Image (cartoon, grey):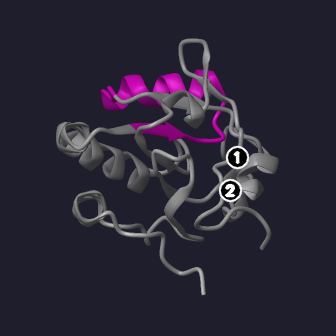
């Protein structure tokens, strides 16, 4: 699989925000950012994962970490997901398959009976450091395997406090 890896500069992807406007992770220069790619409205596990993240969001904020969610869902479906689940975190929509591959994500085709056709990105989590580099990344080809958000937070705290380097480069 081609795409980004740890220590790479996070790609200059413009994320379309639900409700209008765009964001780039570079907009948060000098900040830590966690980008979570969720599979979309069709995924109940994604919804429970984001619900857990919402409970932890204040603790992430205390560490100066910005949070951003994104899926391949179009804006109207992403908006519906936000409303149905009472999400308050920033959500981007319409992640392209090309950008999904740039992020080294696995891509799956929607089931024939779903309201959308085409492909969607499987889950991913990217921790981008204040230098704009991928500090850590996780990706899965399954909705069932994801990093524990409390462990991620603890890892961020340890990395920040001990100024740990990016690992896995050998």
Left/right placement of residue 148 relative to residue 21 reads left
Q: Please tell me whether mark 2 sits on a helix, a strand or a loop.
A: loop
Query: Dividing the picture into quarters, in which one does residue 27 lie?
Result: top right
Number of the front mark, 2 or 1? 1
Q: Which residue is mark 2?
A: 103
Q: Measured from the top left, where is residue 143 in percent x and y?
A: 49, 64
**Disc 1 element:** loop
Mark closest to the chain's N terminus, 2 or 1: 1
Image check: 11 left or right of 88? Answer: right
Residue at the image position 23 percent from the left and 44 percent from the top: 63
Are circles 2 and 1 on residues that touch, CB within 8 Å?
A: yes
Mark 1 Cα shell of 10 Å, populated few (<14), some (14-19), many (≥20): some
Q: Give the Cα distance between marks 2 and 1.
A: 8 Å
Tell me which residue sits at (60%, 71%) in the image: 141
Is 91 on the left-hand or right-hand side of 60?
right
Residue 11 - label: 1
The part of the chain drawn in magenta is 67-88
Residue 30 shown in magenta: no
């Amino acid at each position: 699989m081609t795409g980004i890896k740890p220590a790479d500069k996070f790609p200059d992807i413009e994320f379309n925000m639900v409700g209008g406007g765009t964001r780039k992770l570079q907009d948060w220069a000098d900040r830590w950012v966690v980008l979570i790619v969720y599979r979309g409205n069709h995924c109940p596990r994604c919804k429970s994962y984001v619900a857990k993240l919402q409970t932890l969001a204040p603790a992430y904020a205390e560490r100066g970490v910005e949070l951003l969610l994104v899926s391949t869902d179009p804006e109207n479906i992403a908006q519906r997901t936000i409303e149905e689940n009472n999400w308050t975190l920033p959500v981007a929509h319409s992640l392209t398959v090309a950008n999904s591959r740039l992020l080294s994500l696995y891509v799956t085709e929607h089931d024939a009976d779903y309201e959308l056709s085409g492909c969607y990105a499987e889950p991913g989590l990217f921790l981008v450091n204040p230098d704009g580099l991928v500090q850590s990344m996780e990706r899965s080809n399954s909705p069932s395997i994801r990093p524990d958000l409390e462990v991620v937070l603890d890892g961020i705290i340890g990395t920040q406090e001990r100024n740990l380097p990016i690992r896995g480069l050998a």
